[in-house]
Image: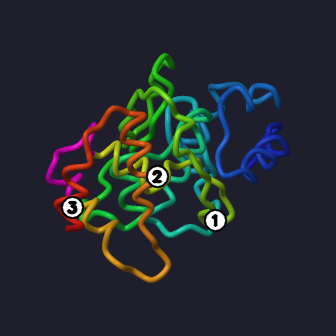
Amino acid sequence: MRKSKYAAALRTLTKKPFFVTSEANLLGIPSRMLVYYCEKGILERIGRGIYKAVNIDTGLDLGVEGLVLTAMSIPRGVVCLISALCYYELTDQIMREYWIAIPNKDKSPKRSHARIVRMRNLILGQTQVKIGKFKLKIFDQERTIVDAFRYLSHEIAIKALQEYLKPIKGRKPDLQKLSEYAEALKVKITPYILALTT
């Protein structure tokens, strides 16, 4: 097979966990070639205009690789709700979609297997976690629980709160922070906390 004139540029791109069409175009690879490389099994399209090498080893467990790649492909996105509850082991729900919060006024990006949620105040409770060699923005446990009461069923939210309140080594509930977040986001969570702690 004849060596492609795009081989060097493609090697540069495939060293990254993922890249976007505009990056490929800047290196001289036209969009039609990205389609061709996908058909040949060299690249995989993971979202609209987002690609990764088929053989790249992210070093991640298959269960979280999709979440990491999806979250990283949305620069202003924050892992939230079911995905965050699963990360913190506060639910028995299965992560069938990757839940990502974006600023309320942003246009929803199209990503396969992603549930995009527009939210106000993405700063409150936002933190970073390291998964493998990647850093992800995610809401902390307290913000995640408060958001569960806002966006999910009460059954899921109450179970998450119960898990959070269980005495587990390495996790100490911060009821002050939980109450402050609930007040800031106008969520009446105090009756549930009292019911579960008294």
Label 1 amino acid? Asp
Tell me which numbered mark, 3 or 1, is placed earlier along the sequence. 1
**Which span is picked out in magenta?**
149-158
Count of marks, rendered view:
3
Work out whether 166 lies above or below 52: below
| Residue 27 quadrant | top right
| Residue 89 quadrant | bottom left
The mark lying in front, picked from 3 and 1, is 3
Q: Which residue is mark 1?
A: 57
Viewer-side residue, 172 vs 34 = 172
Viewer-side residue, 55 vs 92 = 92
Q: Which residue is mark 2?
A: 177
Q: Residues within 10 Å of mark 1 (few under 14, many from 20)?
A: few
Label 2 amino acid? Lys
Q: CA distance from mark 3 to mark 1?
A: 36 Å
Q: Is residue 155 magenta?
A: yes
Q: Secondary structure at mark 1?
A: loop
Q: Is residue 2 magenta?
A: no
Q: Residue 74's spot in the image, x, y percent?
A: 56, 35
Q: CA distance from mark 2 to mark 3?
A: 19 Å
Tell me which numbered mark, 2 or 3, is placed earlier along the sequence. 3
Q: Residue 187's spot in the image, x, y percent?
A: 29, 37
Task: Identify the residue shown where x is 25% and y is 57%.
Answer: 193
Q: Residues within 10 Å of mark 3 (few under 14, many from 20)?
A: some
Q: Which residue is mark 3?
A: 159
Label 3 amino acid? Lys
